[in-house]
Image (cartoon, helix red, strand yellow):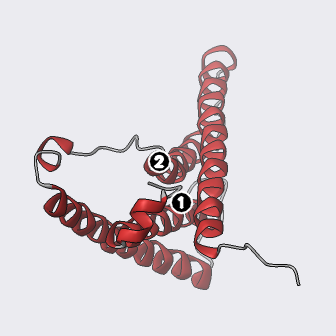
């Protein structure tokens, strides 16, 4: 009989890490797209005296996408804003408790944001809302990007919070920590 070595928690954290890298790449493309779109708008306006009607609208969508898609990768790579000055001065047990509490508070806050974004996405989907710009873009399209990015961030933060509460996981070496 062949023994299976499938480890679901490790597979899940590895999948989240890969998803955060993919989201980061998509955010980078969106940032480049926003820059190119605004550059094209400046050139079109200065040289040809015309405006690209979608430039402002889509540059705004892209910038929101950059922020939300980049949040998960920032967390995975430990490039997020942290206040280690106080936490590192604490004894080991208290430090782990404070880090665990902070992680669970972050899960609650990001979960609240996911619920709000999901509710907003559902409303624009249900009512088929469109932007007021000339493109009349269905708003569910640009809203799904921040919803995906924040959901990914929340899942990564949840795995970090659970791992910080589990002593065995801390000693085994986690992918997301």
In the rendered image of this protein, does residue 8 appear above or below residue 64? below
Does the rendering let one see residue 139?
no
Assign a secondary structure to mark 2: helix
Labels 1 & 2 near each other (Cβ < 8 A): yes
Front-most of residues 29 and 25:
25
Image position of 40 (left or right of 133): right
The residue under the point 60% across, 85% down is 126
Locate residue 141 relative to residue 107 in the image: left or right: right
- Residue sitting farthest toward the top: 47
Q: Which percent across, then down, holds residue 146?
A: 52, 60
Q: Residue at x 40, y 75 (%)?
A: 116
Residue 79 placed where, x, y %?
40, 40
Say which quarter of the image contains residue 145. Answer: bottom right
Location of mark 1 (residue):
149
The residue tagged 2 is 67
Q: Could you tell me which quadrant the N terminus lies in?
A: bottom right
Residue 121 at what x, y percent from top left?
54, 75
Which mark, by number, is residue 45? none
Q: Nearer the viewer, residue 49 or 94?
A: 94
Q: How many marks?
A: 2
Instruction: Identify the image quadrant of the C terminus.
Output: bottom left
Q: CA distance from mark 1 to mark 2?
A: 8 Å
- Could you tell me which residue is drawn at 78 percent across and 77 percent down? 4
Question: What crowding class fits label 2: few (fewer than 14 Cα within 10 Å), some (14-19), or many (20 or more)?
Answer: some
> Residue pushed farthest front?
1
- Is 61 placed above or below 34 here? below
Compare marks 1 and 2 and give the one earlier in the sequence: 2
Residue at horizontal 64%, vertical 22%?
49
111, 161: nearer the viewer: 161
The relative height of residue 36 versus residue 160 in the rendered view (above or below) is above
Say which of 119 and 57 sits in front: 119
């Amino acid at each position: 009989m062949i023994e299976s070595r499938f480890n679901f928690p490790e597979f899940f954290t590895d999948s989240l890490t890969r998803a955060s890298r993919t989201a980061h790449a998509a955010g980078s493309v969106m940032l480049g797209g926003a820059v190119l779109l605004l550059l094209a708008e400046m050139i079109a306006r200065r040289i040809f005296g015309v405006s690209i009607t979608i430039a402002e609208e889509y540059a705004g969508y892209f910038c929101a996408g950059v922020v939300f898609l980049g949040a998960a990768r920032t967390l995975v790579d430990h490039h997020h804003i942290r206040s280690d000055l106080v936490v590192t001065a604490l004894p080991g047990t208290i430090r782990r408790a404070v880090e665990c509490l902070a992680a669970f508070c972050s899960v609650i806050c990001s979960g609240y944001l996911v619920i709000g974004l999901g509710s907003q996405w559902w409303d624009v989907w249900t009512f088929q809302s469109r932007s007021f710009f000339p493109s009349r873009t269905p708003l569910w399209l640009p809203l799904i990007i921040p919803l995906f990015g924040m959901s990914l961030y929340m899942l990564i933060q949840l795995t970090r919070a659970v791992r910080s509460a589990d002593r065995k996981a801390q000693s085994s070496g986690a992918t997301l920590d």
